[in-house]
Image (tube, rainbow, N blue to C red):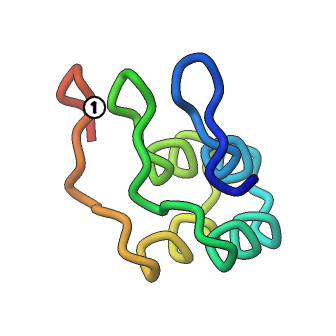
Amino acid sequence: DAKAKDHIRRTVLHLAAQGGNEAMVQLLVDKGADAKARDEFGVTVLHSAAGGGNEAVVRLLVGRGADINAKTQDGET
């Protein structure tokens, strides 16, 4: 399920982005996963990709509408 969430509302897309799995991120987004999804702390999929140092995934997500100015609950971008 491309829209499934864990106990802190992270999606499969968060995990794929953090791990740098570009092919999986592409597949999930193509299957309807939300590129703007946030977990319970306000961490976006884009934050997860950037935190994992995954430049290709960051570019892919930005191209799919991820908000480059999104802030977490702590005000981090």
- Helix, strand or loop at label 1? It is loop
Q: Residue at x 42, y 73 (%)?
A: 62
Q: Is residue 68 left or right of residue 52?
A: left
Q: Which residue is mark 1?
A: 72
* Residue 21 placement: quadrant: bottom right
Q: Residue at x 36, y 75 (%)?
A: 65
Give the x, y percent position of residue 76.
Answer: 25, 32
Relative depth, front residue between 31 and 41? 31
For label 1, count other residues whose C-alpha is less than 10 Å away and answer few (under 14), some (14-19) or many (20+): some
Relative depth, front residue between 35 and 53? 35
Callout count: 1
- Quadrant assignment for the C terminus: top left
Q: Is residue 41 left or right of residue 39?
A: left
Q: Is residue 34 above or below residue 27?
A: above
Q: Is residue 58 left or right of residue 77?
A: right
Q: Is residue 22 above or below residue 13?
A: below
Q: Is residue 14 above or below residue 58?
A: above
Q: Amino acid at mark 1?
A: Thr
Q: Residue at x 65, y 52 (%)?
A: 13
* Residue 22 placement: quadrant: bottom right
Q: Residue at x 40, y 34 (%)?
A: 43
